[in-house]
Amino acid sequence: MALMSGYRSTTKLALASSQPSVKAASKQPAIQVSNLSIVFDTNRGQMIAVDRVSFDVAAGEFVCIVGPSGCGKSTVLNTIAGLELPFEGEILVEGSPVGNPRPDIGMVFQQPHLFPWKSVRRNIAHGPRMLGRSAKEACAIADDLIAMIGLKRFADAYPNTLSGGMQQRVAIARALANEPRVLLMDEPFGALDAQTRAVMQDNLLELRDRIKATIVFVTHDIDEAIVLADRVLIMSAGPGRILREVAVNLPRPRSSAILIEPTYLALKRDCLEVIRAEGLRAFNQSDSS
């Protein structure tokens, strides 16, 4: 599918007339998504991937976006990152419109996508070097982050010698090397085994307390969303819309140990009820078409 980059068609698409706006607690949000619609060209014509989505994220807040496959979670994240352009609507980060990728917006994908010919240190130093930092300054930034992610012994190692979890830690450190105000994470632990994933979640929670960045995290895993987030936004099956906001009022610091807490289980049940109802609706629609 090819994105209609910035093209505003006169074709009358069945966009929702209005959507509830999910507001952050802060009066000056770090991220403002307003009436965002994304439309793709396909061999069957135009397809609405995201339909009039609006939400805010407060500075320093951790928001998770969940929903069924194909609901537009990653498309929303890519648009915040400046990797895709809206068909309609606007995105502001720190008060400025997003049109292209920016160094103050970091991005971590499901696969680490490290440079295989560069060491851990040089992978992490790459961003600062591209921004004009000297080799000495960039290496100092990299070494600080390597210590933060617990990989000092592997500073000179190459990606193919690292485990999947270690590679993803390097990818996170590389995203942090430019000192982004906003960190976007697209199912960064989705390819990891369950044990490594739990460890990475705990590591991210510890790291989040240190970096104080605003984080938007896409996942299909309800457990992961509740463990990590301050708020969970649940999206509908395509076209993607915000169905519900769930506030996660669990004390911090957190770890995966909260998975057996009654409050956690009640939150999970509420989220699953919404997602199951939406999944059934989508299934019935596809079955009748």
Image (cartoon, rainbow, N blue to C red):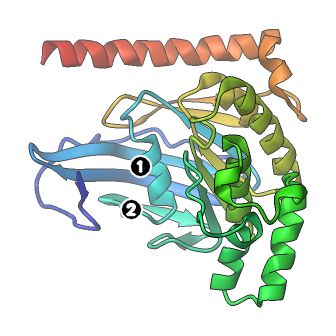
Is label 2 in contact with label 1 (beta carbons under 8 Å)?
Answer: yes
Dot 1 crowding, Cα within 10 Å, few <14, some 14–19, many 20+:
many
- In the rendered structure, the answer to whether residue 123 lies left or right of residue 79 reads right
The picture quadrant where one finds residue 5 is bottom left
Q: Residue 270, how many percent across, how many down?
A: 60, 14
Q: Secondary structure at mark 2?
A: loop
Q: Residue 138, how many percent across, how many down?
A: 78, 80
- Which numbered marker is on residue 84? 2
Looking at the image, how many numbered discs can be counted on the residues?
2
Residue 116, visible in the rendered structure: yes
- In the rendered structure, the answer to whether residue 158 lies left or right of residue 13 reads right
Q: Residue lying furthest front in this view?
A: 161
Q: Amino acid at mark 2?
A: Glu
The residue singled out by tag 1 in the image is: 75
Quadrant location of the C terminus in the rendered image: top left
Q: Amino acid at mark 1?
A: Thr
Q: Residue 67, how many percent across, how many down?
A: 47, 29
Q: What residue is drawn where x is 85% and y is 54%?
A: 151
- Mark 2 or mark 1: name the one nearer the start of the chain: 1
> Considering depth in this image, is 137 or 81 the residue closer to the camera?
137
- Which numbered marker is on residue 49? none
> Considering depth in this image, is 229 or 36 the residue closer to the camera?
229
Does 199 appear above or below 279? below
Dot 2 crowding, Cα within 10 Å, few <14, some 14–19, many 20+:
many
Give how far apart the Cα atoms at labels 2 and 1 are: 8 Å
Residue 27, visible in the rendered structure: no
Q: What residue is drawn where x is 89% and y is 67%?
A: 144
- In the rendered structure, the answer to whether residue 232 lies left or right of residue 243 reads right
- In the rendered structure, the answer to whether residue 267 lies left or right of residue 255 reads left
Q: What residue is drawn where x is 40% and y is 18%?
A: 278
The picture quadrant where one finds residue 146 is bottom right
Q: Residue 260, how many percent across, how many down?
A: 80, 11
